[in-house]
Image: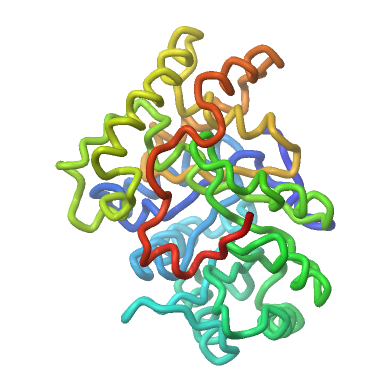
């Protein structure tokens, strides 16, 4: 697995990471043993960048990873671990106060069994609290040795610029895939300029750019996708017609659709480190194969013609979920 730098001055990590939201069963039933087999394959294959969060479960994903480290003490040194805080689980809300973030970080470290986490993200920004103040809190965590690098999730390029005047932001993560191109409107470019890694989450369009056939009616009641307009009719049927063209294109070249979707991201910019989420070793192997696909300019042109910018029907978030995400244009 080739490496990419996790922000200027940061560690080199696998160019494809592993999103651990699914370890909490958010996209289908799972258990710790299944997640641990996935982590075993990650180790064997050189996938060494793991992304989790307090809210995944809540608490389940971090606990599963922490239990893995307790069973495999040497594995910790081989992984770069990112986690996130700042979202209040119940009732759902956002709190970036120093007290709450301190509680979030300390509890995450305890579940993960770590004294320090490699990268700590603010999961969602509290809009009425200046981002400069939040940066001061994070820099304090860093000076205490509790975190090694700072990140933000779903912020705007303008907010990144403000935060970067206070201290270095190692990474920003946002949704980015062939069906979500918003970060091209400034975030990808701003990250490049500031020496910040851009970390695309949901790079497989929440599973729609994979071989998995998503039957909306059979999704668990707790599955996050049920609330997303792109997975509601008539949007979903329109989107499936378009994404099927991409899947057919991939299969005609003996590639898995998920592998091709990740290869497309890796060919966009060299500071992008996608973190496709999966709970199974089988799907992780497919994701890893994306790093081995070399796309030509003609391939990229054809993919762009199949899934042009803006093809997806429906908003990517519900109104409730969108409320804590920064909008920019």
In the rendered image, residue 1, in percent from the top left (x then y), is placed at: 65, 33
Identified at 77% across, 66% down, the residue is: 161
Q: Quick check: 132 above or below 314?
A: below
Q: Quadrant of the C terminus?
A: bottom right
Its colouring scheme is rainbow
Residue depicted at 56% across the width and 34% down the height? 45
Q: Residue at x 38, y 32 (%)?
A: 282
Residue 88 versus residue 32: which sits nearer the camera? Answer: 88
- 123 versus 206 height, above or below: below
Q: Between 303 and 107, which is closer to the camera in this rendering?
A: 303
Determine whether, in the image, residue 217 is placed left or right of residue 39.
left
When asked about the image quadrant of residue 8, the answer is: bottom right
Residue 7, how many percent across, how many down? 77, 55
Q: Residue at x 47, y 78 (%)?
A: 94
Question: Which residue extends farthest left?
Answer: 217
**How many numbered discs?**
0
Q: Nearer the viewer, residue 329 or 141?
A: 329
Q: Position of residue 198 (x, y in %)?
A: 68, 50
| Residue furthest to the top | 252
In the figure, is residue 62 to the left or right of 132?
left
Work out whether 59 lies above or below 306. Answer: below
Which image quadrant for residue 38? top left
Q: Position of residue 217 (x, y in %)?
A: 15, 42
View extreme (bottom): residue: 99
């Amino acid at each position: 697995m080739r490496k990419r730098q996790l922000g200027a001055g940061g560690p080199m990590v696998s160019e494809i990471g592993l999103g651990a939201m699914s370890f909490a069963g958010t996209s289908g039933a799972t258990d710790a043993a299944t997640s641990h087999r996935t982590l075993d394959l990650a180790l064997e294959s050189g996938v060494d960048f793991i992304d989790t969060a307090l809210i995944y479960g809540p608490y389940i994903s971090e606990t599963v990873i922490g239990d893995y480290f307790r069973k495999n003490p040497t594995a910790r040194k081989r992984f770069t671990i990112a986690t996130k805080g700042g979202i209040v689980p119940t009732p759902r809300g956002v709190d970036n106060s120093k007290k709450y973030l301190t509680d979030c970080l300390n509890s995450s470290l305890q579940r993960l069994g770590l004294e320090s986490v490699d990268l700590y993200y603010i999961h969602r920004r509290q809009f009425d609290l200046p981002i400069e103040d939040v940066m001061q809190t994070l820099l304090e965590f860093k000076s205490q040795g509790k975190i090694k690098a700072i990140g933000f999730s779903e912020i705007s390029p303008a907010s990144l610029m403000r935060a970067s005047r206070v201290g270095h932001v190692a990474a920003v993560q946002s949704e980015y895939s062939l069906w979500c191109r918003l970060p091209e409107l400034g975030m990808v470019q701003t990250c490049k300029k500031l020496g910040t890694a851009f970390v695309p989450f949901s790079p497989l369009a929440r599973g729609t750019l994979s071989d998995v056939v998503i039957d909306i009616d059979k999704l668990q009641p707790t599955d996050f996708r049920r609330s997303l307009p792109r997975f509601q009719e008539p949007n979903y049927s329109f989107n499936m017609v378009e994404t099927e063209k991409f899947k057919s294109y991939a299969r005609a070249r003996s590639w898995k659709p998920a592998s091709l979707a990740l290869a497309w991201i890796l060919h966009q910019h060299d500071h992008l480190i996608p973190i496709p989420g999966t709970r199974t070793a089988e799907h992780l192997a497919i994701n890893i194969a994306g790093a081995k696909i070399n796309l030509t300019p003609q391939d990229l042109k054809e993919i762009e013609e199949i899934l042009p910018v803006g093809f997806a029907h429906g908003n990517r978030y519900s109104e409730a979920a969108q409320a804590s995400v920064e909008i920019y244009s």
